[in-house]
Image (tube, rainbow, N blue to C red):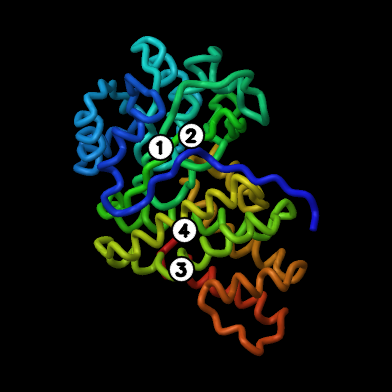
Amino acid sequence: MAIFTFRAAGEITFGVGAVERLGSAIRKTGGKKVLVVVDPGLAKAEAFSKVTRSLERENLPWVLFDRVEPEPRTIIADRCGETARQEKCDFVLGVGGGSAMDTAKAAAILATNGGQARDYQGLDKVPRPGLLKGMVPTTAGTGSEVTFTAVFINEEEKKKAGINSPYLYPEMSVLDPELTLSLPPAPTAFTGMDALAHAVESYTSRAAHSLSEIFSLEGIRLIGKSLRRAVERGSDLAARTDMLLGSLLAGIGLANAGVTAVHSLSYPLGGRFRVPHGVGNGLLLPAVMEYNALSLPEKFAKIAGAMGEEVEGVPVRQAALLAVESVNRLARDVQV
């Protein structure tokens, strides 16, 4: 077995009703004044009220930054970091999808390191730690609550790129499936396909190892089992719980093994044409899987099994292609 390194984010609290523990979890980190980062739509929703009530029960003062946009530009992160500095916050909380969480992570390091978000796009360009930070995902997709990456569009270059640094790992995350119940079918579908891409890519990455593969394969199983139900019946709490846990596991796999050509090809679609990240990944995933399947047939056969395909007694190459068919069918069924 080759030597490998496994890294993970800080404390994770998961389960129905977990948002009730958010305020106390922030208190435990030492946070005293919270910058809450959210998109303007979610700021008006009941799910967000549950977040703020938990803060208020702990008498935690908080400041709102609600200017997050889909596929955010670097300037949004810059403005959020400046708000954290001006308001003298010592904790940044990202609430929502990947855009809000990535903006929060970037703001936390900008508040202490200065400069602009575009200065840190790349690998290990952040010189020192940021503010304390926590994440509350309201979609089952990006896994940003457990990764060291924050992705933004650089408008000058029309290019989408990540800030990648261990200093972006959140100190804590709270995942409550109830907060995902009101997510409409379309974003449920494309964030779910994003999570599936993380799981498949990290499982088949050349950087995968025996520990990361456990998370990635179980993420595939949970998403394959429950994405259709979450899209068709958004109130299905069991399906929403599977999806949020699957997204979390896929994010841990991603953080340790990376991704492959799906994300490489999807970034230009977002940077140049503002195609939502999950849509790009959902469109590209089956094609990249087809290209790769026969170079790694044993792993793709296991993906097929995790997706619910009958692979017992099926030749391994044929089973590998069943994985491609299964993912293609799922993408069509959820209308990505």
Q: Amino acid at mark 3?
A: Arg
Q: Amino acid at mark 1?
A: Met
Q: Nearer the viewer, residue 224 or 11?
A: 11
Q: CA distance from mark 3 to mark 4?
A: 20 Å
Residue 228 picture location, percent across and down: 38, 68
Task: Mark 4: give few (<14), some (14-19) or many (20+) Cα within 10 Å.
Answer: many
Q: Earlier in the sequence, mark 1 or mark 4?
A: 1
The answer for how far apart the CA atoms under marks 2 and 4 are is 19 Å
Which mark identifies residue 246? 4
Residue carrying label 2: 170
Label 4 is placed on what type of residue? Answer: Gly
Eyeballing the image, is 211 above or below 53? below
Q: Is disc 4 placed on a helix, strand or loop? A: helix
Q: Earlier in the sequence, mark 2 or mark 3?
A: 2
In the picture shown, does residue 254 fall above or below 302?
A: above
- 336 on left or right of 289: left
Residue at image mark 3: 332
Quadrant including the N terminus: bottom right
First in sequence, mark 1 or 3: give its number.
1
Please indicate, yes or no, whether residue 264 appears anywhere in the rendered image: no
Figure label count: 4
Q: Are marks 1 and 4 in contact (CB under 8 Å)?
A: no
Q: Which residue is mark 1?
A: 135
Q: Position of residue 230 (x, y in %)?
A: 34, 63
Left/right of residue 139 with respect to residue 150 in the rendered view: left
Quarter holding the C terminus?
Answer: bottom left
Q: Looking at the image, is mark 1 or mark 3 nearer the viewer?
A: 1
Does the rendering let one see residue 61? yes
Percent x, y for residue 208?
Answer: 69, 55
Q: Secondary structure at mark 3?
A: helix
In front: label 2 or label 3 = 2
